[in-house]
Image (cartoon, rainbow, N blue to C red):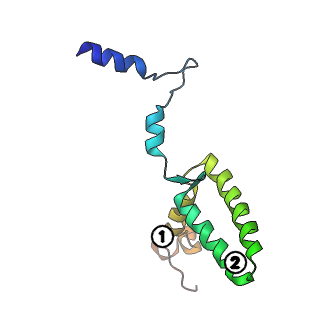
Amino acid sequence: MAIFSLYFHNQGVFMADNGRLQADPLFQGLARPTMILGVSFLFFVLNGAVSMISFINSQNFLVLFLVAPVIHMIGYLLCMHEPRAVELVALRGSRGYLSWNNILGYHHNTNSYDVL
């Protein structure tokens, strides 16, 4: 049993040479969201919806080949930095923003949107 634990302990490098933590590739693969062509699945679906709507509105098939790659490249650059960027924006939008009434202290520090 000691050989088994020694083998797996030597395989996983926890610290790099410069003293920083080094993440295990298996953990990185399991922690990332589902990616299609370098973008998250949610962004891929949103890209398809926006591209189809622009195609239907313009009635020109060439627009589909121009809009989809441009939106995809924006999403690719965004997902290169943070794979869950679209999910984070959706979460921020679902939580709402503070109203001026909350910031100024009116209505017992609650979000109230009535006219003062």
User: Front-most of 64 and 114?
Assistant: 64
Foreground mark, 1 or 2?
A: 2
Q: Quadrant of residue 56?
A: bottom right
Residue type pointed to by label 1 = Asn
Which residue corresponds to mark 2?
Answer: 55
Q: Tell me the residue at 55%/69% (across/down).
A: 98
Confirm or deny contact between disc 1 and disc 2 (CB under 8 A). Answer: no
Residue type pointed to by label 2 = Phe
Give residue 18's position: percent from left, percent from top. Answer: 58, 19
User: Front-most of 110 and 27?
Assistant: 27
Which residue corresponds to mark 1?
Answer: 109
Q: Quadrant of residue 115?
A: bottom right
Indicate the quadrant containing the N terminus: top left, top right, bottom left or bottom right.
top left
Helix, strand or loop at disc 1? helix
Helix, strand or loop at disc 2? helix
Give residue 13's position: percent from left, percent from top. Answer: 46, 21
Q: Tell me the residue at 28%/18% (across/down).
A: 4
Earlier sequence position, callout 1 versus callout 2: 2
